[in-house]
C-alpha cells in the first residue's frame, strides 16, 4: 500500500517552482516559456507515449474500463453541476472545474506499480488511454465557452487532445514506435511532470483561492471524497479481483493533473486559482489515497 510520503516529491517540486520564481533571477518571464514548452511539447509526448506503450485489450477488461469511465464521467457531471449553484464565479468555475475529474497520470502509473506490479501498470495504462480523452474534452469545454472561443476549433488544435486521440488510433491500429523513437519520446515525456509541477509552483498565488473558497472546497470534495467513494462501491458491487479493486480505487483517489494549471493559463483562465487547487489536491491526496485503499480493505 502506498505510504503518506508517496506524493511528497510532487509537492516539493511545486514548492521549488514557487521559490525559484520569486527568489532567483529565473522570474515570471522564464516560466511563461516553460509553460508553453510543457503544454505544446512535453505533456503531449508523455500522453502519446503512455497510450501507445502497450496494446489495449478491451475485451478482457471491460468491467475495469467501464468503471473507470463511469468514475470520470461522474466527476465531470458533478463539476459541471457546480456552475448552477448561485454565486459561483463563472471564470473560476471554467478554470477550476477540470481539477475535479482530471488526474495525474504519472503518479497513477507509479502507484499502480507499487500496488499490483506490471499488471497494475497495464490496467492503469488502459484507464489512462480511455479516460484522458474524455477528461481533456471536458476540461476544454467550459474554458472555451467562457473565453468565447469556438469549442470545435479549440478541440481540433488542443495539443493534449490531439496527442491522446492520435495515441489511441496508433494503438488500435496495432502500430508500434521504433525503439529509438520510443526511447527519445520517453525521455521528452519524462520531463513533463517535474517541469509541469514546478510551473504550477511558479504560478501559485496563495491568495487566489480566497476568491472562491466554497467552489475550491466543492471541487476538492468531488476529487478526493466522491470519486473514491464511487470507486469503492463499484469495485465491491462488480466483485472485481482484489488487485484490480485496489488499482481502480487508487486511480479514483489520485491528485488532479498538474497540466490543469497550464491548460487554464494557455486558454485565458485563472491560472493562480488552478495552481492553488493543484497544490492542495496533491497535499490532500498524500493522505487521502492510502486512506481510500485502507477503507477498501476494511469493507472487503
Image: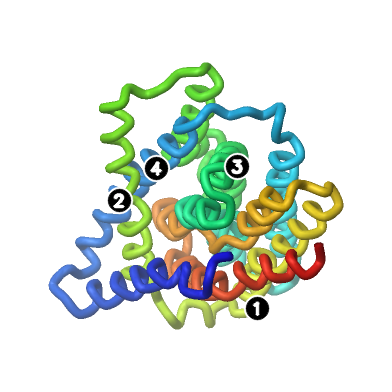
Which is more toward the observer, 205 or 220? Answer: 220
Q: Residue at x 69, y 70 (%)?
A: 294
State the separation of the CA atoms marked 4 and 1: 33 Å
Nearest to N terminus: mark 2 or mark 3: 3
Q: Secondary structure at mark 4?
A: helix
Q: Position of residue 164 (x, y in %)?
A: 49, 35
Q: Is residue 159 above or below residue 211?
A: above
Nearest to N terminus: mark 4 or mark 1: 4
Q: Is any atom of residue 146 visible in this view?
A: no
- The residue tagged 2 is 191
Q: Is residue 251 above or below residue 26?
A: above
Q: Position of residue 262 (x, y in %)?
A: 40, 56
Q: Residue at x 70, y 69 (%)?
A: 225
Q: Residue at x 45, y 59 (%)?
A: 258
- The residue tagged 4 is 46
Asked if residue 45 lies left or right of residue 131, the reply is: left
Nearest to N terminus: mark 3 or mark 4: 4
State the separation of the CA atoms marked 3 and 1: 35 Å
Q: Position of residue 24 (x, y in %)?
A: 16, 76
- The residue tagged 1 is 214
State the separation of the CA atoms marked 3 and 4: 17 Å
Amino acid at each position: 500500500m502506498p505510504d503518506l510520503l508517496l506524493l511528497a516529491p510532487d509537492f516539493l517540486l511545486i514548492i521549488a517552482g514557487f521559490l525559484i520564481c520569486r527568489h532567483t533571477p529565473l522570474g515570471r518571464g522564464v516560466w511563461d516559456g516553460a509553460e508553453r514548452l510543457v503544454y505544446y511539447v512535453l505533456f503531449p509526448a508523455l500522453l502519446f507515449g503512455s497510450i501507445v506503450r502497450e496494446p489495449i485489450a478491451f475485451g478482457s477488461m471491460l468491467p475495469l474500463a467501464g468503471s473507470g469511465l463511469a468514475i470520470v464521467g461522474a466527476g465531470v457531471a458533478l463539476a459541471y453541476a457546480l456552475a448552477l449553484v448561485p454565486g459561483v464565479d463563472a471564470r473560476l468555475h471554467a478554470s477550476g472545474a477540470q481539477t475535479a475529474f482530471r488526474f495525474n497520470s504519472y503518479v497513477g502509473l507509479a502507484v499502480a506499480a507499487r500496488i499490483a506490479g506490471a499488471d497494475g501498470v497495464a490496467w492503469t495504462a488502459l484507464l489512462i488511454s480511455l479516460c484522458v480523452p474524455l477528461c481533456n474534452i471536458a476540461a476544454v469545454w467550459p474554458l472555451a465557452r467562457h473565453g468565447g472561443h469556438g469549442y470545435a476549433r479549440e478541440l481540433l488544435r488542443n495539443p493534449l487532445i490531439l496527442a491522446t486521440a492520435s495515441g489511441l488510433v496508433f494503438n488500435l491500429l496495432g502500430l508500434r514506435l521504433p525503439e529509438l523513437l520510443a526511447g527519445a519520446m520517453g525521455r521528452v515525456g519524462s520531463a513533463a511532470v517535474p517541469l509541469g509541477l514546478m510551473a504550477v509552483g511558479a504560478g501559485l498565488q496563495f491568495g487566489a483561492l480566497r476568491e472562491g473558497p466554497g467552489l475550491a472546497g466543492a471541487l476538492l470534495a468531488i476529487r478526493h471524497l466522491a470519486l473514491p467513494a464511487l470507486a469503492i462501491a463499484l469495485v465491491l458491487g462488480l466483485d472485481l479481483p482484489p488487485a484490480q479493486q485496489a488499482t481502480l480505487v487508487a486511480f479514483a483517489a489520485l491528485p488532479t493533473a498538474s497540466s490543469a494549471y497550464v491548460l487554464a493559463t494557455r486558454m485565458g483562465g485563472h491560472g493562480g486559482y488552478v495552481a492553488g487547487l493543484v497544490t492542495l489536491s496533491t497535499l490532500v491526496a498524500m493522505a487521502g489515497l492510502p486512506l481510500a485503499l485502507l477503507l477498501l480493505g476494511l469493507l472487503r
